[in-house]
Image (spheres, grey):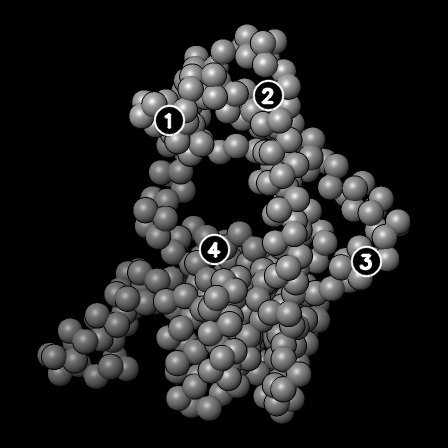
Amino acid sequence: MRESEFSHRAADETLPLRDAFAVLFFVSVGMLFDPLVIIDEPLRLLAVLAIVMLGKTLAAIALVLAFRYPLNTALTVGASLAQIGEFSFILAALGVALGLLPTDGQSLILAGALVSIAFNSLLFTAIEPAQAWIRARSPLARRLELRDDPLAELLMSVDQSLLRGQIVLVGYGRVGRRIAQALDERGIPYVVAEQNRELVEKLRARGTAAVSGDASEAAVLIQAHIARASMLVIATDETVGVRRMVQIARTLNPPIEVVLRTHNAEEAELLRRENIGVVFMGEHELALGMTRHVLSRFGVAAGQARRPGHDPEASRSR
């Protein structure tokens, strides 16, 4: 439904239902929770909280640092995992049903989940002060803070002649992959900016210049050498960060040409009025291709095929 014209309407109309299910979920958990476990088993509850909020957090931070991410990223990931998810409730209920877990154990898990969820927002608030405190007292932490993700930087072996006048291709999904294939066939240089690290690794393995990260962040576009690019092609269907990408690109490279896609006619019209760039509507382009094929069967030249609809420039406009 996200790719249909009713996506925004569907999201608005299902929002109350989503809230209702969220309320039902926490009410159900609260009905299973025995508050006496806090009084009867305080030490065991503290042990559960220590495993969840300290053990999981430290393990996550260590793993993220082992993958050569910066310290800030490691702290953020660690804080996000310092709680028990809903899947643990399912496992606990299944354990009780199979006789593998006592009822008191389920109560401890529920109590630990509620407490960890309640305090999780405080951990996120403490990330920045903790980072400053650790950085001020540890030279190792300062080195970790300055360490960058290797996939977020272009390899030094990339031919510099291919990084002048190149195309910066944001997104390597279904659309981006086809665009890249066409560029490869014609020998046009490009750099891919993609959030999926596995895709970036595969692209680099076959010799394609690629960087990992969110292109709405300036560092990612800078690594893609947007300042020397001739065109920015945003092939991702997420339009949330499009304006930020274009703003960064035009700040670093004012004359750059921008091409992007959208599945929503209202969004396309809004982007056109804001002079974001050349906007392509997926449904219109598909209809145009099908129309050309049908008309070609009836002897109509491809150049005479007009776009379906009232405005031939509705889906491609500056």
| As drawn, 138 above or below 224 | above
The amino acid on which the numbered mark 2 sits, given as a three-letter code, is: Arg
268 sits left or right of 127 in the view: left
Residue 215, picture quadrant: bottom right
Residue 138 in picture, x, y percent from top left: 85, 52
Query: Foreground: 126 or 115?
Result: 115
Residue 273 in picture, x, y percent from top left: 53, 58
Query: Foreground: 51 or 99?
Result: 99
In space, the residues marked 1 and 2 are separated at their CA atoms by: 18 Å
Q: Which residue is mark 2?
A: 44
- Single out the mark in the foreground, 1 or 3: 1
Label whose residue precedes the other's in the sequence (1 or 3): 1
The amino acid on which the numbered mark 1 sits, given as a three-letter code, is: Leu
Neighbourhood count class around disc 2 (C-alpha, 10 Å): few under 14, some 14–19, many 20 upward: some
Residue 27, picture quadrant: top left
Report helix, strand or loop for mark 2. Answer: helix
In space, the residues marked 4 and 1 are separated at their CA atoms by: 45 Å
> What residue lies at 55% left-to-right and 58% top-to-bottom?
242
- Single out the mark in the foreground, 2 or 3: 2
The amino acid on which the numbered mark 3 sits, given as a three-letter code, is: Leu
In space, the residues marked 2 and 4 are separated at their CA atoms by: 45 Å
Disc 1, disc 3: CB below 8 Å?
no
The answer, for residue 106, to whether it is visible in the render is yes
Disc 4, disc 1: CB below 8 Å?
no
Tag of residue 178 = none
Tag of residue 238 = 4
Residue 103 in picture, x, y percent from top left: 42, 17
Disc 2, disc 3: CB below 8 Å?
no
Neighbourhood count class around disc 3 (C-alpha, 10 Å): few under 14, some 14–19, many 20 upward: few
